[in-house]
Amino acid sequence: MPLNSVQQYIRDQVNGLEFPITQQATLAAFIAPPNPGDQITPLCYVWGAESDEVRKTMPRGPGNKEITYRVDMWVYFTEDSDDELADSLFPVVIDTITSRLRTMQTNIQITDPQTGAESGLVAAGENIKVDYAPARTLATEALMQYMARIIVEVREWVRG
């Protein structure tokens, strides 16, 4: 199934990302969303996508289709509320993730690990949208939690 393989590909591209500010941990990426309140490490879950499917060959029967996904990535980051780098830490997280998305390898064959379905990833990261919400304090008020939604566009060719 194309959506499954695309979500896994995106997750694998950002999982383990290291950030240029050394006090930040590496990014932990998931598909099924964990509880962000339980995580201190920067985390991202790749969950859901809006998509458009367009036939590129004659109608009906086997043929080529292009699917354009707008994949949602939900990014959470928790830090001390009195951190002297508070103005920079989360923007650096966002910038590091979007930089990786812009440089993903494309024109590759990907395979769904559950179904074995193959498809071609023809473009990824050409269009990225970021919605960066205001920080909120957690229950202890010693920590601030930041959240952003990154939407990355991915185009895939499938046969069928």
Image (cartoon, helix red, strand yellow):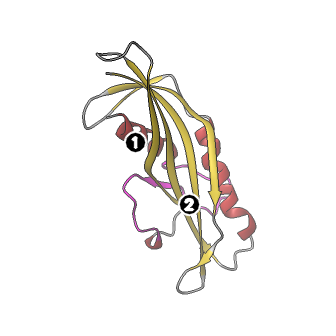
Q: Most prominent secondary structure in the magenta stretch?
A: loop
Residue 21 at x, y percent in the picture = 68, 58
Figure check: 87 above or below 108: below
Which residue is denoted by mark 2 in the rendering? 25
Mark-to-mark CA distance, 1 and 2: 22 Å
What element does badge 2 sit on? loop
Which residue is denoted by mark 1 in the rendering? 8
The amino acid beneath tag 2 is Ala
State yes or no: residue 134 in magenta: no
Q: Nearer the viewer, mark 1 or mark 2?
A: 1
Figure check: 139 above or below 96: below
Residue 59 at x, y percent in the picture = 36, 16
Q: In this view, does 76 lie to the left or right of 160?
A: right
What element does badge 1 sit on? helix
Residue 152 found in image quarter = top right
Whichever of labels 1 and 2 marks the residue nearer the N terminus, that label is 1
Residue at 41% in and 68% down: 35
Residue at 54% in and 87% down: 140
Q: Which of 159 and 39 is in front in this view?
A: 159
In this rendering, the count of numbered labels is 2
Residue at 63% in and 52% down: 130
Residue 36 at x, y percent in the picture = 46, 68
The amino acid beneath tag 1 is Gln
Stretch in magenta: 15-36
Q: In which quarter of the image is the C terminus?
A: top left
Per the rendering, the mark at residue 120 is none
